[in-house]
Image: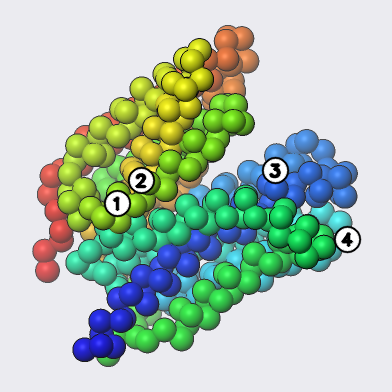
Amino acid sequence: MVASARLPLSRLAILWLAGAALRLTVLAVPPVLPLIHREFALSEKAVGVLSGLPVLMFGFAAIPGSLLIARLGARRAAVAALLLVAAASAARGIGPSATLLFGMTFLMAAGIAALQSALPALVGEWFPDSPGPATAVYANGLLIGEAAPAALTLPMILLIGASWRAGLALWSLPVAATALLLAISPRDPDHVPAPKAARWWPDWRDRHTWQLALMQGGTGGVYFATNAFIPDYMLAALNLVQLPASVVLLLWARRLISCKAGYVGMPIIGIFGIAGLLSARLWIAAFAAGAIGFCCAFVLILTLALPPQLAAAGDVHRLSAGMFAVGYSLACLVPPLGGLLWDATGIPATAFLASAASGAAVSAAAISLRAADLLPRSK
């Protein structure tokens, strides 16, 4: 009884670490980007590619990640993905030129794409009766994984007197440790390996694929575009207030995942927050930025919890892959569209119209969900 009581906690801890691994190695780059820029004499276009490549790959490599899960199963695919992320991340600083840096960033992002599709499938296997709380756990890890490298990378390399290369390699260590923990963690006595002929291609005729893609992509579009256009001093409010949202979901996920009002209403609150960014009063704009961050995290976590609930056990990775493939592709379009509107009108505020439209798309997709979709799947 003691062992079985401990098992869920150990699995939750592994999920949290895997969630952090989704962002640790990616967000280690911005703090040292000026050093990389100077050493390799990168153009501004190259800097943009280096920064945007991971997000693009999250979408492009999602479906190959689904194939990996179909062949290996969610657990072993997650281990393989974590090892690829750790190895490629550590290798980014090895070469004397930027060629290896870009190549390893490509592989690292492909590993993260596979991992992000494996985690919902792993949640479905480990916590079929409570996908919401389990998803909130790894989403909390993801948010911490965004904040920690951004805050600690420079102090860490200054403390040990290391270069940016060592700084990037150090963040690969917790990712490798997570792979080891997942590989040696105990299995269920009745564990059944994934079938060799498991399907992997997303079902594009399934309405859930498009509903979740719009919800995940629209939420990402609001977040990325807001990050791109608000002043630096508001970024802390936007990003830090995401953490309370993950805590709320940790505490009340079972109730909130079945409440359609949250999916529909939170993006609307976010749209009001976008309007609040234009206020001349600093405290109102900062509050609005925090509200956007809270709403984005809230809807994202709920959306990530839906694939294990909507799809059959062997198809969670397919639904997740379709959601991420379309969702990240859409999210990447929102910031450039905002920039085009700004350039075309010469009015800075018009850059946020794309964000508002993205938030409206989330609410529209959520409205189209049926009430039965949000109820626990019957066995």
In the picture of the structure, the residue carrying the numbered disc 2 is 245
In the picture of the structure, the residue carrying the numbered disc 1 is 249
Q: Quadrant of the C terminus?
A: bottom left
In the picture of the structure, the residue carrying the numbered disc 4 is 96
At label 1, which amino acid type do we have?
Leu
Mark seen at residue 49 = 3
Q: With respect to residue 213, does 338 lie above or below?
A: above
In the image, taking residue 358 as reference, residue 56 lies left or right, namely right
User: Dot 3 surroundings within 10 Å: few (below 14), some, or many (20 or more)?
Assistant: few
* In this rendering, the label closer to the viewer, 3 or 1: 1
**Label whose residue precedes the other's in the sequence (3 or 4):** 3
Q: Please, what secondary structure does the residue beneath circle 2 have?
A: helix
Locate residue 275, reporting x and y percent: 42, 18
**Label whose residue precedes the other's in the sequence (3 or 1):** 3
**Label whose residue precedes the other's in the sequence (2 or 3):** 3
Q: Quadrant of residue 271?
A: top left
